[in-house]
Image (cartoon, rainbow, N blue to C red):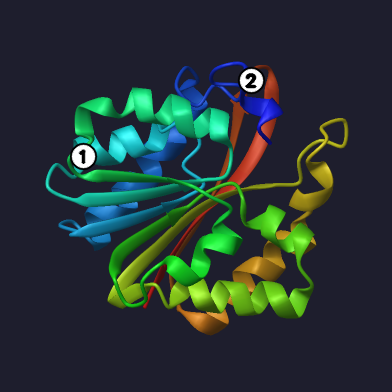
Amino acid sequence: MNKTFSNPDPWKYFASEYEQIKYKRQIDVIKDRKPNPERILELVSAEGAQTLLLAKQFSYTKITGIEISPNAFRIAQENLKGHRGRIELVNADMMEHEPRIEENTYDVCIWSESVYYIGARLTFNDTYEFLKKMVGKLRAGGLLVMANTVDLSKDLPEWIVTERPLINCYYNFLSSLITPALKSIYIEQKLGRIYEYQIWAFQR
């Protein structure tokens, strides 16, 4: 993962209109359902593209971002230096860091484009248990918002973890742990390719 971030913005999170629109849609879900969050937990915050938008939109909210890549973490620190007073960045594997994340603490957890990598590392039973633990980080009434790509083209290395039956499993797992509030499907173009992604929201 760290090699991926050896060049800045490898997935064009800052530069791509596709990515910026996807972030905006997730933030709009938060604005609609949890408009004044005190604390937001962002899992897999990468270089801080979405973190920056969250900080601008929710100007009094404390945000904790967790990112495994040291390179991405370092770049995020620079990108977010104007908001250091209320953004905490943690350079850690979220699976290893999970016990240090306080339970019943966050109004919003935003977790995009990475649940499939958890599923690739763990058994189905352990994946379910990990999702249960992460749901427990939310306060009563808290909101979980996710965007997940579905069925990537088979010429891309990540395709195997985004197959539709797997994505459906993660949705079903979460739906048994926390109340589904939204499921929207988008099919759009990025850099000459067509992608499908789904935005989910669940409320505790």
Q: Position of residue 152 (x, y in %)?
A: 76, 40
Residue at 70 percent across and 53 percent down: it is: 117
* Res 6 label: 2
Give the quarter of the figure containing the N terminus: top right
Q: Is residue 61 left or right of residue 141?
A: left
Residue tagged 1: 57
- Label 2 sits on a secondary structure element that is helix
* Res 189 label: none
Q: Position of residue 128 (x, y in %)?
A: 65, 77
Q: Position of residue 185 (x, y in %)?
A: 55, 50
In the image, residue 154 above or below residue 62: above
Residues at marks 1 and 2, CA–CA distance in whole angstroms: 29 Å
> Which residue in the rendered view is the most extreme toward the right?
155
Residue at 35 percent across and 72 percent down: it is: 138
Q: Nearer the viewer, residue 97 or 35?
A: 97
Foreground disc of the pair 1, 2: 2
